Image (cartoon, rainbow, N blue to C red):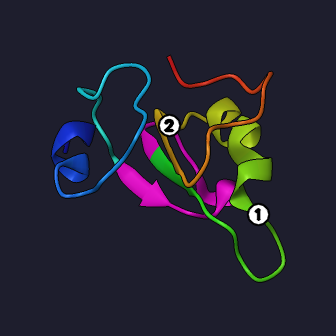
Amino acid sequence: MQLRPLLDNLQYTLAQGSLDVDILDITDDSRQVRPGCLFIARAGHANDGQKYIGDAIAQGAVAILATTSPAVGVATPQ
């Protein structure tokens, strides 16, 4: 599935890069990210997923869904 249809029913304020990337899996656990994943960087009970955006990208995430923009200096998927 591509990212664009996944976002069709969401209200969002910012999208960077192409929305026409193939999403092979979705996870909110950065340790489970594999190439082609959409990583949902959400706050949990003990950790904030935003801290793991860089790790998710390094492991092959092709898209990030977050409640706020990534910190300055965090790379975004190409």
At horizontal 50% and vertical 61% (from top left) the residue drawn is 27
Give residue 6's position: percent from left, percent from top.
Answer: 23, 51
Label disc, if present, on residue 35 of the rendered structure: 2
Q: Report the mark closest to the observer, 2 or 1.
A: 1
Label disc, if present, on residue 68 of the rendered structure: none
The answer to which quarter of the image holds residue 67 is bottom right
Q: Residue furthest front?
A: 13
Towards the viewer: 20 or 66: 66
Between discs 2 and 1, the one toward the N terminus: 2
At horizontal 45% and vertical 45% (from top left) the residue drawn is 37
- Label 1 sits on a secondary structure element that is loop
Towards the viewer: 25 or 77: 77
Does residue 19 appear left or right of residue 31 in this picture? left
Q: Which residues are magenta?
A: 25-37
Residue 32: in magenta span: yes
- Alpha-carbon distance for marks 2 and 1? 22 Å
Q: Residue furthest bottom?
A: 45
Does residue 75 appear left or right of residue 16 in this picture? right
Task: Give the residue number, with chain letter if any, for mark 1.
Answer: 48
